[in-house]
Image (cartoon, grey):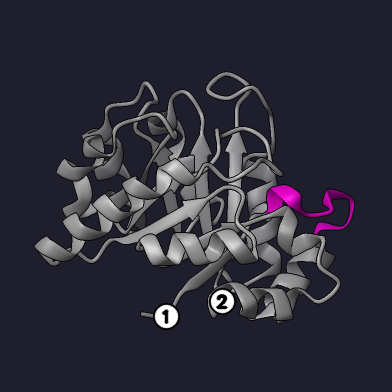
């Protein structure tokens, strides 16, 4: 199974975002991961619909939007209209999970569900048949550059087994603290999509680092 790499623009240079989008395109990465934070669901505020629209207008890459917001259902249409190709939202949000998934699917894009590190992975199981993405947060959501929580990998393995056992087409994504060493751990646990931020953007040669994450020694 080919491992996908999704650079998170949360760690990009927002004063020159177009340049960093170009770096992502030239690196051979698969997707652009776009973290949206509302300052309520998590203790940080990032960027939202206008920035996503600007990004979508300067790249043809797949835009993987991760909503860390209190009421994702309310904003699905706006994010799809701004260019999202997949929207992943939190099981812990206040929106009804089934209704939010159905709304995303009704707009013709992929739906994803994610959980914080302390949330039981089993809450995701009833929805896997309809999901394109099952995201395990390997840090507490809200800030980039945090340390990898290794204990979350048991959730990745449980998801991988449940997906494979039922023949679902859902990918398992890991986000948080991904670098050359933790990528090996996540892939071994069953991940097939890795989100990485500061580790990629701080690299002088992003292409080399992307390839290193995809094919760890």
Q: Would you say residue 14 sits in the magenta stretch?
A: yes
Apparent side of residue 203 relative to residue 210 in the rendered image (left or right): right
Residue at the (52%, 41%) spot, across then down: 149
Residue 84 seen = yes
Apparent side of residue 169 relative to residue 146 in the rendered image (left or right): left
Disc 2 marks which residue? 216
Please tell me in which quadrant of the rendered image residue 188 appears.
bottom left
Please tell me in which quadrant of the rendered image residue 118 appears.
top left
Q: Would you say residue 84 sits in the magenta stretch?
A: no
Up the image or down, 206 lies above or below 50; here it is below
Residue at the (57%, 80%) spot, across then down: 217
Between the residue at mark 2 and the residue at mark 1, the CA separation in whole angstroms equals 12 Å
Q: Give neighbour class at mark 1: few <14, some 14-19, many 20+ (Cα, 10 Å).
A: few
Q: Quadrant of the N terminus?
A: bottom left
User: x, y percentage for residue 70?
Assistant: 47, 23
Disc 1 marks which residue? 2
Query: Which of 149 and 61 lies nearest the eye of the viewer?
Result: 149
Name the magenta segment's main secondary structure: helix
Query: Which of 8 and 190 lies nearest the eye of the viewer?
Result: 190
Q: Secondary structure at mark 1?
A: loop
User: x, y percentage for residue 184?
Assistant: 51, 67
Circle 2/circle 1 CB separation < 8 Å: no
Give the extent of the magenta segment: 9-17
Up the image or down, 109 lies above or below 121; here it is below
Up the image or down, 81 lies above or below 91; here it is below
User: x, y percentage for residue 10?
Assistant: 70, 47
Mark earlier in primary sequence (2, 1): 1
Q: Residue 88, labelled with which disc?
A: none
Residue extending furthest left? Answer: 166
Please tell me in which quadrant of the rendered image residue 211 appears.
bottom right
Q: Secondary structure at mark 2?
A: loop
């Amino acid at each position: 199974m080919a491992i996908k790499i999704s650079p998170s623009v949360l760690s990009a240079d927002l004063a020159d975002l177009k340049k960093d989008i170009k770096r992502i395109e030239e690196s051979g990465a698969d997707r652009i991961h776009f973290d949206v934070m509302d300052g309520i669901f998590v203790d940080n505020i990032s960027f939202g619909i206008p920035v996503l629209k600007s990004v979508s207008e300067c790249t043809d890459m797949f835009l993987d939007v991760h909503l860390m917001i209190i009421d994702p259902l309310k904003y699905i249409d706006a994010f799809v209209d701004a260019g999202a190709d997949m929207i992943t939202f939190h099981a812990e949000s206040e929106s009804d999970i089934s209704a939010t998934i159905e709304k995303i699917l009704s707009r013709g894009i992929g739906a994803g569900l994610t959980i914080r590190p302390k949330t039981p992975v089993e809450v995701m199981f009833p929805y896997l048949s309809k999901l394109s993405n099952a995201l395990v947060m390997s840090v507490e959501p809200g800030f980039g550059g945090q340390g990898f929580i290794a204990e979350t990998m048991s959730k990745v393995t449980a998801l991988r087994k449940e997906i494979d056992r039922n023949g679902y087409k859902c990918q398992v994504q890991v986000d948080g603290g991904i670098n050359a060493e933790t990528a090996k751990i996540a892939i071994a646990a069953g991940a097939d999509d890795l989100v990485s931020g500061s580790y990629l953007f701080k690299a002088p040669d992003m292409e080399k680092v992307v390839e290193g994450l995809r094919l760890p020694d």
